[in-house]
Amino acid sequence: MVRPAELRDAAAIARVHVETWRTAYRRLLPQEYLASLDQAAYEGRWKRILETDANKVYVAENDGHVVGFASAGPERAGEPGFSGELYAIYVLASAQGQGHGRGLVKASVGGLRELGLADMIVWVLKDNPSRRFYEQLGGIYLREQPLTIGSAVVQEVSYGWKRLEDVRA
């Protein structure tokens, strides 16, 4: 089940955020950086985000427990040709392959439409195997750029959809 996130979901979103970073990026980012991720700090961050209407945030639940989340809103970096952005989407490893990711993308696309946005871009670490997910959704590879996370400089790539109708969620 996917639903709009509520303020009461901030702690669960923070837990999923930290846990998924530690598992998904364990071979891509320095271990000391991943170990330093503070769930309480992320909870505060998510509370601030959920208190505004600037973004759309959704959670995926399994048996009443949050197992994933996504957030989307206006494109943040001035990328030409895109007004909407999928900021984040994370699903616990134990809940992957069950349709939660597609459900979260579908909800995010609906949220972008509610904001009056007609297209979408997403950034993903180049070496992250989840890139295939965006390709399966019909995302078109756009470009690559360096990104500093902690002490690591990694490459991130972008995928875009010129029309939200083209997202195959």
Image (cartoon, rainbow, N blue to C red):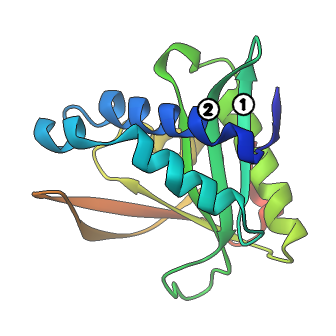
Is the residue marked by circle 2 packed among few (<14), some (14-19), or many (20+) residues within 10 Å?
many
Residue shown at the point (45%, 64%) measured from the top left: 158
x and y percent of residue 122 in the render?
A: 54, 61
Which of the pair 150/93 is nearer the observer? Answer: 150
Q: Say if mark 2 contacts mark 1, CB within 8 Å.
A: yes
Q: Quadrant of residue 117?
A: bottom right
Q: Quadrant of the N terminus?
A: top right
Which of the pair 106/149 is nearer the observer? Answer: 149
x and y percent of residue 155 in the render?
A: 24, 60
20 sits left or right of 67 in the view: left
x and y percent of residue 14 in the render?
A: 51, 39
Using the numbered discs, state the Cα–Cα distance from disc 2 to disc 1 in whole angstroms: 5 Å
Residue shown at the point (79%, 46%) measured from the top left: 106
The vertical placement of 145 against 103, above or below, is below
Mark 1: secondary structure? strand
Q: Earlier in the sequence, mark 2 or mark 1?
A: 1
Question: Which residue position is annotated with label 2?
Answer: 68
Question: Which residue position is annotated with label 1?
Answer: 60
Indicate the amino acid at tag 2. Answer: Gly
Indicate the amino acid at tag 1. Answer: Ala
